[in-house]
């Protein structure tokens, strides 16, 4: 029997996926693939990781041996030049001619390059292939200022690439009045823009480029509003253009604006020719994401193997991390009132924007937008797609149920079996749950191998993990919560292993207990463990827990930093106040009293930080650790010293507590409060630990927090003396440091703890595990190892050298930082 021949034109992600799906379903075809690039298919979705150490092989989706094992003939670097539909032949650049029975066009798209004078100059690049990235990588070392033309998904990815390449100043140029106009609304875009500016990007909106200036190489951009931007490098990422030139040459129907017209079977105007991916135009739309391309590939495979599956469009919901900022949109994100009701949560301090659109009867979720915090994305998308009836308080979907409890009937296990979990690979809930129950697969790596779920864009991985855990729990199995694919241990297990092994840097931890090169999940988690165990100077670590740790200060809008000295208990002398004023005047800093009873100094230049710290330390101040996952403040009221209602001296006790735990690193920030009576002026019950005076002593409350999901602290012990309270607090904090998951506040930690407060009370107060003495000893060791990180830097010339904006001109400040007057002070322009 002679097998029908299928020729695939294009060896990108979608072309490869077609081959993978076809050989999995049938061995009755002779498959020939032609690729234009010199390498086999690779992951374009994660292309920017090429600048983070991943090689072309790491990004590769397959190997040459895979094609050989499946009898697929592969021609690389040999694009098809001509299609003869009458003779059913294709002719390649190298002169090869093959006859086909069916032809699959997976030619993808190319970068859209606007017709602007000067695009041919040296220093102008597109961002599309590994070859493009290699050219950018070679050029970047001689660049000081770069720009990206395009503020959409691809443009912001390109901007991240420039930052990863070490370009000191990066600009984003967008023609539209907002970033990502196709995915997010104006308010969400404004929040994203604010977050990106904090990270050092300069954003230019409503900009139309007239021409690219310079001689043989780029020197500047000239805009139609007559403004000019001096740059050394330009990356054009202004959208995509379907690769439909072959289709036009052979007479296939194409769209007015490009794209190969297809029907619901993915057939072109020639029934023997199919088109899939970004070259295909279905009902006037080009689908620029990988998931719909994979679905198109599956449709064609289904048609070729006598199936009846059809394509009726695709959900373009998406979640991604742009330069470290979560961005997601789902369902109908742009529907407005009166066609819906809109619920919006906005936190400008933390850079979080959440919008959900619900039906006018309040029963259905229609869509929404998430900026800065997209943890709820997967469940929100499932709620839209499966038409799940909303809870009585739909705002809980973005704010969380009151008290941290999950509402009955919610959660991943309540989803219908046919709920589509991985849209890239069309894997539903039933397939994942049965893989756990029937095949015993309990890891995300195993699930990827068995079902392919999570191997595309990766956005579904958190939901897949939750389904694995939920199924295991339903089956009565033990659930092991590992840090990531590089460490087969929970944070608690790794904490103990690192301690026993006396290991003090990330590379050794990875060598002893992990595999691979690590990732953005495990590096900060291990940094947290190392900090919590050894309390070494954070800037000496080869990895850091938080980006602000790198310069021991919080980066602010406009590229400046804020300085927050410790003011224990909120008590400060007039002389110290005067010093703060003198420092603020000398360095032109904006001053504000914080909610934690401290004084924050904003607008510091990077190379001024050590000098500012030196003056503050000479006056008796220390680092306030406002930049770290550590104890921040212990807030106090004036207590019995001044207040006629005060029962005890709350200020002195707050100072004692803050001085004891200062500098101690934890999975997340820690805040405390001490109130002198039940009137609670220090808001102690809104803190990770709160102490309130009673007639007989002190009450200790734990695991509260404010923020976007406020939760009251819970009563752990009543009417205890100061010594007992410090002992319980030692145990509580150390138990939290040792057992909490990465980046978990104490409230979240308690909410997830089996047995809740009763269990915690047994461990801390009743010493049910017999760990009390050990926890106290470990805490005392951390207390004894305290050092002021600012002082360590100013006394170490090598560390101090790091605090410069220009290596070759250490005294020169960042010229892009500008200030403007505001209420007798200044603020940074941005």
Image: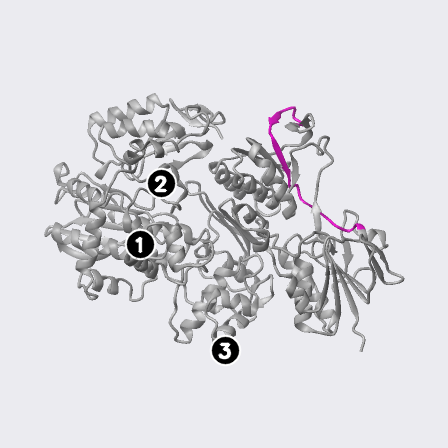
Residue at 42% over, 76% down: 475
The local crowd at label 2, few if under 14, some if 14 to 19, many if 20 or more residues have their Cα within 10 Å, is some
Residue 270 place in picture, x, y as percent: 83, 62
Q: Which mark is residue 746?
A: 1
Q: Which residue is mark 3?
A: 438
Direction from residue 807 to residue 747 in the image, left or right: left
The local crowd at label 1, few if under 14, some if 14 to 19, many if 20 or more residues have their Cα within 10 Å, is many
The residue lying furthest to the left in this view is 696
The answer to which of marks 2 and 3 sits earlier in the sequence is 3
* Part of the protein shown in magenta: 223-245
Q: Which mark is residue 539?
A: 2
Distance between the Cα atoms at labels 2 and 3?
Answer: 48 Å
Q: Which mark is residue 326?
A: none
Q: Is residue 202 above or below residue 280?
A: above
The answer to which of marks 1 and 2 sits earlier in the sequence is 2
Direction from residue 743 to residue 337 in the image, left or right: right
Residue 617 placement: quadrant? top left
Residue at 23% over, 56% down: 732
Q: Is residue 809 above or below residue 646?
A: above
Residue at 24% over, 32% down: 621
Q: Is residue 262 magenta?
A: no
Distance between the Cα atoms at labels 1 and 3?
Answer: 36 Å
Q: Is residue 235 magenta?
A: yes
Residue 640 place in picture, x, y as percent: 13, 40
Kindly state the secondary structure of the residue where label 1 is placed.
helix
Kindly state the secondary structure of the residue where label 2 is placed.
helix
Check contact, mark 2 vs mark 3: CB within 8 A.
no
Q: Nearer the viewer, mark 2 or mark 3?
A: 2
The answer to which of marks 1 and 3 sits earlier in the sequence is 3
Check contact, mark 1 vs mark 3: CB within 8 A.
no
Residue 111 placement: quadrant? top right
- Of residues 287 and 394, which is closer to you in this image? 287
């Amino acid at each position: 029997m002679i097998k029908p021949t299928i020729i695939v034109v294009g060896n990108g992600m979608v072309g490869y996926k077609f081959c993978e799906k076809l050989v999995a379903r049938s061995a009755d075809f002779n498959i020939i693939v032609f690729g234009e690039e010199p390498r086999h298919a690779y992951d374009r979705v994660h292309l920017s990781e090429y600048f983070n150490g991943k090689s072309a092989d790491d990004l590769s989706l397959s190997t040459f041996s895979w094609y050989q094992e499946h009898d697929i003939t592969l021609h690389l670097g040999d694009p098809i030049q001509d299609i003869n539909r009458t003779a059913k032949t294709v002719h390649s650049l190298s002169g090869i001619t093959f006859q086909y029975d069916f032809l699959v066009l997976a030619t993808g798209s190319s970068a859209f390059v606007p017709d602007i004078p000067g695009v041919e100059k040296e220093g102008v690049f597109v961002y599309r292939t590994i070859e493009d990235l290699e050219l950018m990588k070679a050029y970047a070392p001689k660049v000081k200022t770069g720009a990206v033309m395009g503020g959409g998904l691809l443009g912001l990815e390109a901007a991240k690439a420039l930052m990863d390449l070490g370009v000191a100043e990066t600009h984003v140029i967008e023609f539209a009045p907002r970033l990502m106009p196709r995915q997010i609304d104006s308010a969400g875009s404004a929040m994203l823009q604010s977050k990106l500016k904090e990270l050092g990007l300069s954003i230019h909106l409503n900009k139309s480029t007239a021409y690219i200036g310079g001689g043989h190489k780029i020197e500047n951009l000239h805009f139609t509003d007559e403004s000019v931007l001096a740059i050394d490098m330009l990356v054009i990422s202004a959208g995509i253009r379907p690769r439909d030139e072959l289709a036009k040459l052979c007479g296939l129907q194409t769209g007015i604006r490009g794209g190969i017209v297809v029907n619901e079977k993915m057939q072109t105007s020639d029934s023997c020719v199919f088109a899939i991916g970004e070259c295909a135009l279905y009902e006037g739309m080009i689908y620029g994401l990988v998931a719909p391309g994979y679905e198109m590939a599956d449709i064609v495979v289904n048609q070729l193997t006598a199936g009846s599956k059809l394509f009726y469009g695709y959900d373009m919901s998406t979640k991604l991390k742009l330069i470290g900022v979560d961005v997601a949109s789902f369902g109908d994100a742009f529907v407005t009132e009166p066609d819906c009701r809109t619920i919006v949560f906005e936190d400008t301090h933390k850079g979080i924007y959440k919008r959900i659109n619900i039906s006018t009867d309040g029963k259905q979720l229609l869509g929404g937008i998430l900026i800065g915090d997209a943890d709820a994305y997967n469940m929100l998308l499932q709620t839209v797609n499966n038409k799940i009836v909303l809870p009585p308080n739909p705002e809980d979907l973005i704010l969380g149920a009151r008290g941290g409890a999950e509402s009955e009937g919610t959660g991943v296990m309540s989803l219908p079996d046919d709920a589509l979990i991985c849209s890239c690979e069309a894997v539903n809930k039933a397939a994942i749950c049965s893989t756990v129950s029937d095949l015993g697969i309990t890891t995300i790596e195993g699930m990827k191998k068995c079902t392919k779920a999570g191997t595309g864009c990766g956005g579904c991985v958190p939901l897949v993990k939750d389904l694995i855990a939920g199924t295991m729990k339903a089956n009565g199995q033990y659930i092991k919560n590992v840090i990531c694919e590089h460490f087969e241990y929970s944070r608690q297990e790794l904490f103990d292993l690192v301690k026993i092994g006396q290991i003090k840097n990330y590379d050794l931890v990875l060598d002893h207990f992990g595999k691979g090169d690590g990732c953005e999940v495990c590096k900060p988690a291990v940094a947290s463990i190392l900090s919590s165990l050894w309390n070494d100077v954070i800037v000496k670590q080869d990895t850091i827990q938080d980006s602000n740790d790198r310069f021991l200060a919080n980066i602010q809008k406009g590229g400046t930093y804020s300085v927050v000295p410790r003011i224990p208990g909120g008590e400060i002398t007039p002389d110290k106040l005067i010093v703060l004023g003198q420092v603020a005047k000398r360095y032109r800093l904006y001053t504000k009293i914080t909610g934690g009873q401290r004084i924050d100094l904003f607008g510091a230049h990077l190379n001024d930080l050590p000098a500012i710290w030196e003056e503050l330390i000479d006056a008796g101040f220390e680092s306030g650790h406002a930049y770290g996952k550590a104890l921040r403040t212990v807030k106090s009221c004036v207590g019995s010293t001044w207040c006629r209602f005060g029962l005890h001296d709350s200020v002195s006790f707050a100072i004692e507590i803050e001085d004891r735990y200062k500098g101690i690193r934890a999975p997340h920030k820690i805040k405390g409060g001490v109130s002198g009576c039940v009137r609670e002026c220090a808001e102690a019950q809104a803190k990770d630990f709160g102490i309130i005076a009673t007639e007989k002593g002190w009450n200790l409350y734990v695991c509260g927090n404010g923020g976007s999901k406020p939760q009251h602290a819970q009563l752990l012990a009543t009417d205890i003396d100061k010594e007992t309270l410090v002992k319980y607090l030692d145990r509580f904090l150390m138990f939290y440091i040792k057992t909490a998951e990465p980046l978990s506040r104490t409230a979240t930690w308690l909410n997830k703890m089996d047995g809740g407060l009763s269990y915690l009370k047994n461990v801390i107060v009743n010493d049910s595990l017999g760990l009390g003495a050990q926890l106290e000893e470990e805490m005392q060791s951390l207390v004894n190892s305290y050092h002021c990180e600012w002082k360590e830097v100013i006394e170490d010339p090598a560390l101090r050298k790091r605090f410069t904006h220009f290596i070759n001109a250490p005294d020169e400040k960042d010229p892009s930082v500008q200030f403007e007057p505001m209420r007798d002070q200044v603020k940074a322009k941005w």
